[in-house]
Image: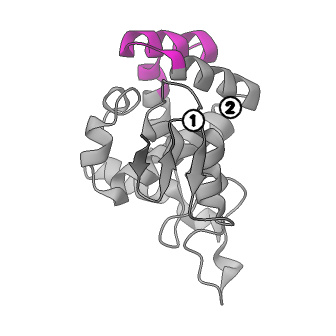
């Protein structure tokens, strides 16, 4: 019996299906869902999808001049960094340790907080830190097989060379200096 996640489903045969044949956001989710008994947290899946779905997502069809530079994500006509920065300033940005292993906190967050935060952190890892894509893939493989949060945090440290807490501090500094106006 399969599990349902909004408009995608995992079958018991290791197949991932989506009702969106040409939606790049949903396609990114389908391509990153590991076909194993283990799963990575939705924080990573949504972050990857948000990172790769720009500028198609939330860009008015008659005004795609609003499209952001490559890989900044899009959320309601702003970059994911804009929204993550706003939540950081309001004290609403959740701690990453609460999001990276299980879905319990991620699923309770407002979508307008959870998705931009995930996309912003993944974009930060891949663009500002910068981690290389092969490193990130290696981490996702280890994350999918992690049997505890401690294992996942160890994998993060091993692959990226810094703790998740240190990466979070650097991400927050990055967000504090983010200027959305520089994109226009």
Quadrant of the rendered structure where residue 104 is? top left
Q: Residue at x 54, y 73 (%)?
A: 58
> Of 122 and 151, which appears nearest the observer?
151
Q: Is residue 93 visible?
A: no
Helix, strand or loop at mark 2? loop
Q: Position of residue 159 (x, y in %)?
A: 62, 15
Where disc 1 sits, the SS reads: loop
Read off the magenta span.
145-167
- Which residue is label 1 attached to? 13
Please state which of residues 178 and 140 is positioned toward the viewer in this rendering.
140
Query: In terms of secondary structure, what is the magenta stretch mainly?
Result: helix
Can you tell which mark lies on residue 67? Answer: none
Residue 120 percent coordinates (x, y): 51, 47
- Which comes before the other along the chain, label 1 or label 2? 1
Identity of the residue drawn at 28% across and 56% down: 110
Query: Is 47 located above or below residue 23 in the figure?
Result: above
According to the picture, the residue beneath numbered tag 2 turns out to be: 130
């Amino acid at each position: 019996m399969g599990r349902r996640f909004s408009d995608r489903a995992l079958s018991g045969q290791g197949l991932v299906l989506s009702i969106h044949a040409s939606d790049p956001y949903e396609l990114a989710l389908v391509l990153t869902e590991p076909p194993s008994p283990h799963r990575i947290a939705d924080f990573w899946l949504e972050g990857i999808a948000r990172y790769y779905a720009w500028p198609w997502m939330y860009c008015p069809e008659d005004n795609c001049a609003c499209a952001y530079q490559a890989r900044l994500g899009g959320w309601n006509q702003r970059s994911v960094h804009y929204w993550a920065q706003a939540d950081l300033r309001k004290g609403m940005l959740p701690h990453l340790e609460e999001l990276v292993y299980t879905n319990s906190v991620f699923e309770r967050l407002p979508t307008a907080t959870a998705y931009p935060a995930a996309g912003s952190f993944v974009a930060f890892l891949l663009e500002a830190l910068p981690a290389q894509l092969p490193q990130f893939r290696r981490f996702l493989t280890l994350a999918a097989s992690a049997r505890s949060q401690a294992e996942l945090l160890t994998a993060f440290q091993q692959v990226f060379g810094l703790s998740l807490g240190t990466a979070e501090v650097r991400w927050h500094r990055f967000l504090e200096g983010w200027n959305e106006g520089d994109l226009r």
